[in-house]
Amino acid sequence: MLRDITLGQYYRTESIIHKLDPRVKIVGTFVFLVAIFMVNNAIGYAIAGLFLAMNIKLSNVPVRFIFRGMRSIFLLLMISVLFNLFLTPGDPMFTVWKIKVTKEGLKLAAKMAVRLVFLITGSSLMTLTTTPNNLTDGLESILKPLKLVHVPVHEISMMMSIALRFIPILLEETDKIMKAQMARCADFESGSIINRAKNMVPLLVPLFISAFRRAMDLAMAMEARCYRGGEGRTKMKPLVYHKEDKVAYVVLVLFLIICVAVGRMKF
């Protein structure tokens, strides 16, 4: 399951989405996340789904690879669906034991499930098509106005990029530790969910030690290269908008307008 998490990974291939400016992809992801919370009917979700499917097709990233990340959030998805399904008051449809299932709960559970799937897929698509360096440069460029109020934009962007990059690294490290302990007769797969959670506790100490060691190695490498923050630093590849990026912004604006218009409709 740890290998199924795609957030933070970069899929190397040639596509239109890969070639877009990182600022476009960051803004596009934000617009998409806002849009899926603004629509509240089947037509709106269908439009958002078509938009997401179009971007997946243009990215040349295998659909199986993208949706593989859904396995890792299946438990979270089920908890969200069940809580909304059983704990939402309204017109009851039927009763399971002493818990009533309402029409409003069923609708809300379906909406939350779709939103969560779209949220994870859209965020994963951004990291799969953007290198960590480009992601850092894009974030820094977008947050640049905050420098006027003395916000360390470069450092914040660097930390966010490193945090995203560390996700697949730490997951890979966790997988290695689990296999090493399983070779010594550790059991992580049998028993109840509570027992499995307890069996995961011995992973924490070596995982934390490994994480701190990697962080220390990274800090020493940055110090050895005389890294002193963003002041006075130049870019080897400055970000420049091209025709494709401007077209992408127009598409994003149209998509947001359509979602807002559809979200205001009542069916």
Image (spheres, rainbow, N blue to C red):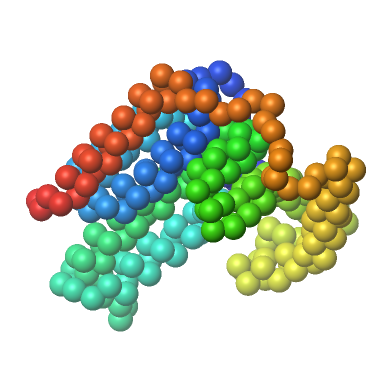
Q: Residue at x 23, y 41 (%)?
A: 257
Front position in the image: 52 or 4: 52
Nearer to the camera, 176 or 44: 44
Residue 247 at least partly seen: yes
Image location of residue 80, percent across then percent down: 41, 63
- Residue at the image point whose x is 27% and y is 72% from the top: 88
Q: Which residue is drawn at the image coordinates 64% and 25% (left, top)? A: 237
Q: Residue at x 37, y 62 (%)?
A: 81
**Number of marks in the rendered image:** 0
Q: Nearer the viewer, residue 3 or 185?
A: 3
Location of residue 27 in the rendering, given as x and y in whole percent from the top left corner: 43, 41
Camera-side residue: 97 or 19? 19
Q: Is residue 235 above or below residue 149?
A: above
Image vertical order of residue 66 relative to residue 220, above or below: above
Horizontal side of residue 24 vs 147, given as left or right = left
Q: Is residue 109 left or right of residue 134?
A: left
The answer to whether residue 58 is left or right of residue 199 is left
Q: Position of residue 195 (x, y in %)?
A: 67, 71
